[in-house]
Amino acid sequence: MREEFAPRDRHVLVKSPNYRHQALRRRIAAVCGVLVIALVSSVIGVLSHRHEAPLGEPQTRPFSYLSE
């Protein structure tokens, strides 16, 4: 039924998204999911990181055994 002949007082059926739109939505959802997981893990890493070493413990860095 063409739109100009459709009754105005009732709900008009709309076309469902085609395969390309569905694939695009799934791709965007997957990328957003990965970004959310990365953001959450980085926030957890920042919150759980000790900024200062307690007194008495040596400060070690990567390759610090080469400097001695």
Image (cartoon, rainbow, N blue to C red):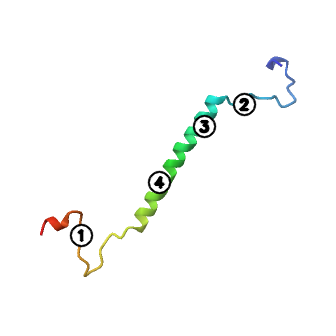
Mark 4 burial class by Cα count in 10 Å: few <14, some 14-19, many 20+: few
| Amino acid tagged 1 | Thr
Quarter location, residue 16: top right
Give the residue pinned by disc 4. Answer: 39
Q: Please name the amino acid that badge 2 sits on.
A: Ser
Using residue 6 as the reference point, say whether residue 33 is left or right of it: left
- In whole angstroms, how far apart are the C-alphas of marks 2 and 3? 13 Å
Secondary structure category for the residue under label 3: helix
Q: Is residue 12 left or right of residue 58?
A: right
Residue pictured at 52% horizontal, 43% vertical? 31
Number of other residues with Cα within 10 Å of mark 3, as a class: few under 14, some 14 to 19, many 20 or more = few
Residue 50: % across, % down? 36, 70
**Distance (Cα) linking label 3 and label 1:** 47 Å
> Mark 3 or mark 1: which comes first in sequence?
3
State the mark number for residue 25.
3
Residue drawn at x 74%, y 28% as measured from the top left: 15
Disc 2 to disc 1, how far (Cα)? Answer: 59 Å
Mark sitting earlier along the chain (4/3): 3
Residue sitting at x 87%, y 29%: 9
User: In this view of the protein, which residue sits in the foreground, 5 or 48?
Assistant: 48
User: What residue is at 61 percent from the left and 29 percent from the top?
Assistant: 20
Q: How far apart are the two marked residues, 4 and 3, measured between alpha carbons? A: 21 Å
Q: Give the number of the disc on residue 16.
A: 2
Q: Is residue 18 above or below residue 63?
A: above
What residue sits right under mark 1 in the picture? Answer: 60
